Amino acid sequence: MSVGEMKHCLMRIRSSYNSFNETEQKIANYILNQPHRIVHGTINEVADEIGIAVSTVFRFCQKIGFKGYQAMKIVLATELVEPIKDIHEKILETDNEVAVAEKVFHANITTLEQTLKLLDKQAIEKAVDLIHSARLVELFGCGGSNVIAQDAYHKLIRTGISVNKQIDTHMQMMAASQLGEGDLGILISHSGATRDILDILEVLNENNVQTIAITNFAKSPLSELADVVLSTVSEETDFRSEALASRIAQLSIIDAIYVNVLVKQKHHGKSALNRVRKAISSKRI
Protein backbone atom coordinates (compact mmCIF):
# COMPACT_ATOMS: atom_id res chain seq x y z
CA MET A 1 0.00 0.00 0.00
CA SER A 2 1.42 3.39 -0.97
CA VAL A 3 1.86 6.34 1.41
CA GLY A 4 -1.09 8.07 -0.24
CA GLU A 5 -3.35 5.10 0.48
CA MET A 6 -2.53 5.11 4.19
CA LYS A 7 -4.76 8.15 4.63
CA HIS A 8 -8.29 8.18 5.98
CA CYS A 9 -11.21 6.86 3.96
CA LEU A 10 -14.25 8.41 5.69
CA MET A 11 -12.58 11.81 5.82
CA ARG A 12 -11.85 11.64 2.10
CA ILE A 13 -15.47 10.82 1.32
CA ARG A 14 -16.91 13.57 3.55
CA SER A 15 -14.61 16.28 2.23
CA SER A 16 -15.20 15.26 -1.40
CA TYR A 17 -18.94 14.59 -1.10
CA ASN A 18 -20.19 17.74 -2.87
CA SER A 19 -18.02 16.95 -5.90
CA PHE A 20 -19.62 13.51 -6.42
CA ASN A 21 -22.30 12.85 -9.02
CA GLU A 22 -25.60 11.22 -8.04
CA THR A 23 -24.34 7.63 -8.34
CA GLU A 24 -21.14 8.41 -6.47
CA GLN A 25 -23.16 9.99 -3.67
CA LYS A 26 -25.15 6.76 -3.39
CA ILE A 27 -21.91 4.84 -2.87
CA ALA A 28 -20.66 7.49 -0.45
CA ASN A 29 -23.87 7.33 1.59
CA TYR A 30 -23.65 3.56 1.73
CA ILE A 31 -20.06 3.66 3.02
CA LEU A 32 -20.71 6.45 5.52
CA ASN A 33 -23.90 4.86 6.89
CA GLN A 34 -22.81 1.21 6.80
CA PRO A 35 -19.00 1.06 6.94
CA HIS A 36 -19.05 -2.38 8.59
CA ARG A 37 -20.80 -3.83 5.52
CA ILE A 38 -17.87 -2.66 3.39
CA VAL A 39 -15.32 -4.25 5.74
CA HIS A 40 -17.15 -7.58 5.91
CA GLY A 41 -18.52 -7.68 2.35
CA THR A 42 -17.19 -8.16 -1.14
CA ILE A 43 -17.30 -5.60 -3.93
CA ASN A 44 -19.94 -7.71 -5.69
CA GLU A 45 -22.18 -7.74 -2.60
CA VAL A 46 -21.87 -3.98 -2.17
CA ALA A 47 -22.64 -3.34 -5.84
CA ASP A 48 -25.72 -5.58 -5.65
CA GLU A 49 -27.05 -3.87 -2.52
CA ILE A 50 -26.62 -0.40 -4.01
CA GLY A 51 -27.94 -1.56 -7.37
CA ILE A 52 -24.98 -0.51 -9.52
CA ALA A 53 -22.20 -2.16 -11.51
CA VAL A 54 -19.08 -3.53 -9.80
CA SER A 55 -16.95 -1.39 -12.09
CA THR A 56 -18.73 1.74 -10.77
CA VAL A 57 -17.79 0.87 -7.19
CA PHE A 58 -14.22 0.18 -8.29
CA ARG A 59 -13.96 3.54 -10.06
CA PHE A 60 -15.32 5.27 -6.95
CA CYS A 61 -12.54 3.72 -4.86
CA GLN A 62 -10.00 5.04 -7.35
CA LYS A 63 -11.60 8.48 -7.42
CA ILE A 64 -11.05 8.93 -3.68
CA GLY A 65 -7.41 7.88 -4.02
CA PHE A 66 -7.25 4.10 -3.54
CA LYS A 67 -5.93 1.50 -5.97
CA GLY A 68 -9.14 -0.46 -5.58
CA TYR A 69 -11.83 -1.83 -3.29
CA GLN A 70 -9.50 -3.96 -1.17
CA ALA A 71 -7.15 -1.06 -0.45
CA MET A 72 -10.09 1.11 0.65
CA LYS A 73 -11.44 -1.74 2.76
CA ILE A 74 -8.17 -2.08 4.71
CA VAL A 75 -8.02 1.62 5.58
CA LEU A 76 -11.72 1.66 6.49
CA ALA A 77 -11.25 -1.32 8.83
CA THR A 78 -8.51 0.61 10.67
CA GLU A 79 -10.81 3.61 11.08
CA LEU A 80 -13.55 1.46 12.60
CA VAL A 81 -11.11 0.21 15.22
CA GLU A 82 -10.11 3.80 16.03
CA PRO A 83 -13.14 5.83 14.91
CA ILE A 84 -12.60 9.36 13.67
CA LYS A 85 -14.74 12.02 15.33
CA ASP A 86 -16.97 14.14 13.12
CA ILE A 87 -15.21 17.29 12.00
CA HIS A 88 -18.09 19.47 13.18
CA GLU A 89 -20.51 19.26 16.04
CA LYS A 90 -24.01 20.08 14.84
CA ILE A 91 -25.09 23.57 15.85
CA LEU A 92 -28.70 23.72 16.97
CA GLU A 93 -31.08 26.68 16.97
CA THR A 94 -31.66 26.01 20.68
CA ASP A 95 -27.94 26.41 21.52
CA ASN A 96 -27.05 29.48 23.54
CA GLU A 97 -24.18 31.80 22.60
CA VAL A 98 -21.61 30.01 24.73
CA ALA A 99 -22.56 26.59 23.30
CA VAL A 100 -22.27 27.91 19.74
CA ALA A 101 -18.89 29.49 20.50
CA GLU A 102 -17.60 26.25 22.02
CA LYS A 103 -18.75 24.21 19.02
CA VAL A 104 -17.11 26.64 16.58
CA PHE A 105 -13.83 26.47 18.51
CA HIS A 106 -13.99 22.67 18.67
CA ALA A 107 -14.73 22.52 14.94
CA ASN A 108 -11.73 24.72 14.14
CA ILE A 109 -9.46 22.61 16.32
CA THR A 110 -10.67 19.39 14.69
CA THR A 111 -10.33 20.88 11.21
CA LEU A 112 -6.68 21.67 11.98
CA GLU A 113 -6.06 18.20 13.40
CA GLN A 114 -7.59 16.44 10.40
CA THR A 115 -5.82 18.69 7.89
CA LEU A 116 -2.51 17.95 9.61
CA LYS A 117 -3.17 14.21 9.33
CA LEU A 118 -3.73 14.54 5.58
CA LEU A 119 -0.86 16.98 5.02
CA ASP A 120 1.42 15.81 2.23
CA LYS A 121 4.93 16.16 3.65
CA GLN A 122 6.58 16.04 0.23
CA ALA A 123 4.21 18.73 -1.06
CA ILE A 124 5.17 21.05 1.82
CA GLU A 125 8.87 20.51 1.11
CA LYS A 126 8.38 21.15 -2.61
CA ALA A 127 6.29 24.28 -1.93
CA VAL A 128 8.95 25.75 0.35
CA ASP A 129 11.69 25.01 -2.21
CA LEU A 130 9.69 26.63 -5.02
CA ILE A 131 9.01 29.78 -2.98
CA HIS A 132 12.63 30.00 -1.83
CA SER A 133 14.01 29.75 -5.36
CA ALA A 134 11.36 31.75 -7.26
CA ARG A 135 12.28 34.98 -9.03
CA LEU A 136 8.83 36.38 -8.18
CA VAL A 137 5.93 34.90 -6.20
CA GLU A 138 2.45 36.06 -7.23
CA LEU A 139 -0.59 35.26 -5.06
CA PHE A 140 -4.07 34.65 -6.45
CA GLY A 141 -7.48 34.26 -4.79
CA CYS A 142 -11.08 35.33 -5.33
CA GLY A 143 -13.75 36.25 -2.78
CA GLY A 144 -12.96 34.83 0.63
CA SER A 145 -9.81 33.22 -0.76
CA ASN A 146 -8.57 36.70 -1.67
CA VAL A 147 -8.45 37.47 2.04
CA ILE A 148 -6.31 34.36 2.59
CA ALA A 149 -4.05 35.40 -0.28
CA GLN A 150 -3.68 38.84 1.32
CA ASP A 151 -2.61 37.19 4.59
CA ALA A 152 -0.05 35.12 2.66
CA TYR A 153 1.31 38.32 1.11
CA HIS A 154 1.49 39.91 4.57
CA LYS A 155 3.57 36.96 5.76
CA LEU A 156 5.83 36.32 2.77
CA ILE A 157 6.82 39.97 2.25
CA ARG A 158 8.65 39.68 5.59
CA THR A 159 10.96 36.97 4.24
CA GLY A 160 12.81 39.14 1.73
CA ILE A 161 11.55 37.24 -1.31
CA SER A 162 9.91 39.14 -4.16
CA VAL A 163 6.16 38.73 -3.69
CA ASN A 164 3.16 40.43 -5.25
CA LYS A 165 -0.62 40.39 -4.85
CA GLN A 166 -3.53 41.99 -6.72
CA ILE A 167 -7.08 42.35 -5.37
CA ASP A 168 -9.13 42.80 -8.55
CA THR A 169 -9.59 39.59 -10.57
CA HIS A 170 -8.86 41.37 -13.86
CA MET A 171 -5.63 42.73 -12.39
CA GLN A 172 -4.78 39.21 -11.22
CA MET A 173 -5.21 37.94 -14.77
CA MET A 174 -2.98 40.73 -16.07
CA ALA A 175 -0.34 39.92 -13.45
CA ALA A 176 -0.49 36.23 -14.40
CA SER A 177 0.11 37.10 -18.06
CA GLN A 178 3.41 38.79 -17.15
CA LEU A 179 4.88 35.83 -15.25
CA GLY A 180 7.25 33.37 -16.90
CA GLU A 181 9.73 30.60 -16.23
CA GLY A 182 11.41 31.10 -12.87
CA ASP A 183 8.31 32.75 -11.38
CA LEU A 184 5.76 31.08 -9.11
CA GLY A 185 1.99 31.38 -8.80
CA ILE A 186 0.21 30.44 -5.56
CA LEU A 187 -3.51 29.92 -6.15
CA ILE A 188 -5.94 29.71 -3.23
CA SER A 189 -9.44 28.34 -3.77
CA HIS A 190 -11.51 26.22 -1.39
CA SER A 191 -13.57 24.59 -4.14
CA GLY A 192 -10.78 24.44 -6.69
CA ALA A 193 -13.43 25.09 -9.32
CA THR A 194 -13.73 28.89 -9.39
CA ARG A 195 -13.78 30.04 -13.00
CA ASP A 196 -11.56 33.10 -12.43
CA ILE A 197 -8.89 31.02 -10.67
CA LEU A 198 -8.96 28.32 -13.35
CA ASP A 199 -8.59 31.00 -16.05
CA ILE A 200 -5.55 32.36 -14.20
CA LEU A 201 -4.12 28.84 -13.86
CA GLU A 202 -4.51 28.31 -17.61
CA VAL A 203 -2.51 31.45 -18.32
CA LEU A 204 0.20 30.43 -15.85
CA ASN A 205 0.48 26.97 -17.40
CA GLU A 206 0.72 28.47 -20.88
CA ASN A 207 3.63 30.62 -19.64
CA ASN A 208 5.39 27.63 -18.00
CA VAL A 209 5.00 29.14 -14.54
CA GLN A 210 5.29 26.73 -11.60
CA THR A 211 2.12 26.67 -9.47
CA ILE A 212 1.08 25.82 -5.92
CA ALA A 213 -2.60 25.24 -5.09
CA ILE A 214 -4.08 25.55 -1.61
CA THR A 215 -7.51 23.94 -1.81
CA ASN A 216 -9.92 21.48 -0.21
CA PHE A 217 -9.08 17.77 -0.28
CA ALA A 218 -11.74 16.98 -2.88
CA LYS A 219 -10.38 16.36 -6.36
CA SER A 220 -10.92 19.45 -8.49
CA PRO A 221 -9.66 21.01 -11.72
CA LEU A 222 -7.26 23.16 -9.70
CA SER A 223 -5.76 20.27 -7.74
CA GLU A 224 -5.38 18.17 -10.89
CA LEU A 225 -3.59 20.88 -12.90
CA ALA A 226 -1.36 22.60 -10.30
CA ASP A 227 2.24 21.43 -9.81
CA VAL A 228 1.99 21.22 -6.01
CA VAL A 229 -1.23 20.75 -4.02
CA LEU A 230 -1.65 21.54 -0.31
CA SER A 231 -5.00 20.24 0.87
CA THR A 232 -7.32 21.22 3.70
CA VAL A 233 -10.17 19.20 5.24
CA SER A 234 -13.52 20.72 6.17
CA GLU A 235 -17.23 19.95 6.23
CA GLU A 236 -20.33 22.05 5.76
CA THR A 237 -22.96 22.39 8.49
CA ASP A 238 -26.37 24.09 8.60
CA PHE A 239 -24.91 27.33 9.98
CA ARG A 240 -21.37 27.24 8.67
CA SER A 241 -20.03 26.68 5.19
CA GLU A 242 -17.09 24.35 4.58
CA ALA A 243 -15.23 27.25 2.95
CA LEU A 244 -15.47 29.18 6.22
CA ALA A 245 -14.14 26.22 8.20
CA SER A 246 -11.27 25.62 5.77
CA ARG A 247 -10.06 29.21 6.23
CA ILE A 248 -8.42 28.27 9.54
CA ALA A 249 -6.57 25.37 7.92
CA GLN A 250 -5.51 27.50 4.93
CA LEU A 251 -4.07 30.16 7.24
CA SER A 252 -2.18 27.50 9.18
CA ILE A 253 -0.70 26.03 5.99
CA ILE A 254 0.44 29.53 5.01
CA ASP A 255 1.96 30.07 8.47
CA ALA A 256 3.83 26.76 8.17
CA ILE A 257 5.17 27.76 4.74
CA TYR A 258 6.16 31.22 5.99
CA VAL A 259 8.17 29.89 8.93
CA ASN A 260 9.81 27.23 6.75
CA VAL A 261 10.82 29.84 4.17
CA LEU A 262 12.30 32.05 6.90
CA VAL A 263 14.32 29.11 8.21
CA LYS A 264 15.52 28.26 4.69
CA GLN A 265 16.49 31.89 4.04
CA LYS A 266 18.79 31.75 7.09
CA HIS A 267 20.63 35.06 7.65
CA HIS A 268 18.93 36.72 4.67
CA GLY A 269 15.51 35.87 6.12
CA LYS A 270 16.38 37.22 9.56
CA SER A 271 17.73 40.43 8.05
CA ALA A 272 14.59 40.92 5.98
CA LEU A 273 12.38 40.32 9.01
CA ASN A 274 14.37 42.81 11.08
CA ARG A 275 14.07 45.43 8.34
CA VAL A 276 10.29 45.00 8.33
CA ARG A 277 10.13 45.25 12.12
CA LYS A 278 12.25 48.40 12.08
CA ALA A 279 10.17 49.98 9.32
CA ILE A 280 6.84 49.45 11.09
CA SER A 281 8.10 50.24 14.58
CA SER A 282 7.61 53.97 13.92
CA LYS A 283 3.87 53.30 13.48
CA ARG A 284 3.49 52.30 17.10
CA ILE A 285 2.72 54.92 19.74
Image (tube, rainbow, N blue to C red):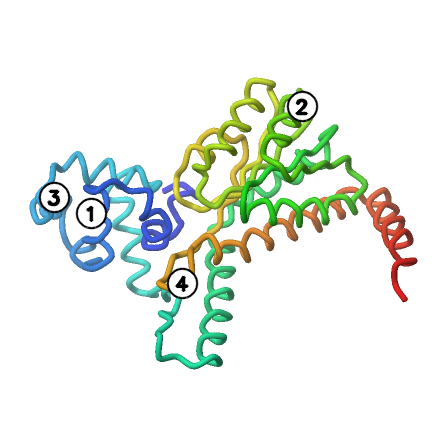
Left or right: 204 with respect to 44?
Answer: right
Which badge, 3 or 4, is on the more N-terminal residue? Answer: 3
Q: Are marks 3 and 1 in contact (CB under 8 Å)?
A: no
Residue picked out by circle 3: 47
Per the model, the C-alpha gap separating discs 1 and 2 is 43 Å
Identity, as a three-letter code, of the amino acid under mark 1? Ile
Q: Quadrant of the N terminus?
A: top left
Q: Which mark is residue 179?
A: 2
**Displayed quadrant of residue 241:** bottom left
Q: Mark 4 sits on what residue?
A: 87
N-terminal-most mark, 4 or 2: 4
Q: Nearer the viewer, residue 27 or 128?
A: 27
Dot 3: element: helix
Q: Nearer the viewer, mark 3 or mark 1?
A: 1
Q: How far apart are labels 4 and 2 at the CA level?
A: 39 Å
Give the residue type at disc 4.
Ile
Q: CA distance from mark 3 to mark 4?
A: 28 Å
Q: Amino acid at mark 3?
A: Ala
The part of the image, by quadrant, that contains residue 34 is bottom left
Give the residue pinned by disc 1: 27
Which of disc 1 and disc 4 is earlier in sequence?
1
Q: Position of residue 186 (x, y in %)?
A: 61, 36
Q: Position of residue 279 (x, y in %)?
A: 90, 51
Residue at disc 4, secondary structure: loop
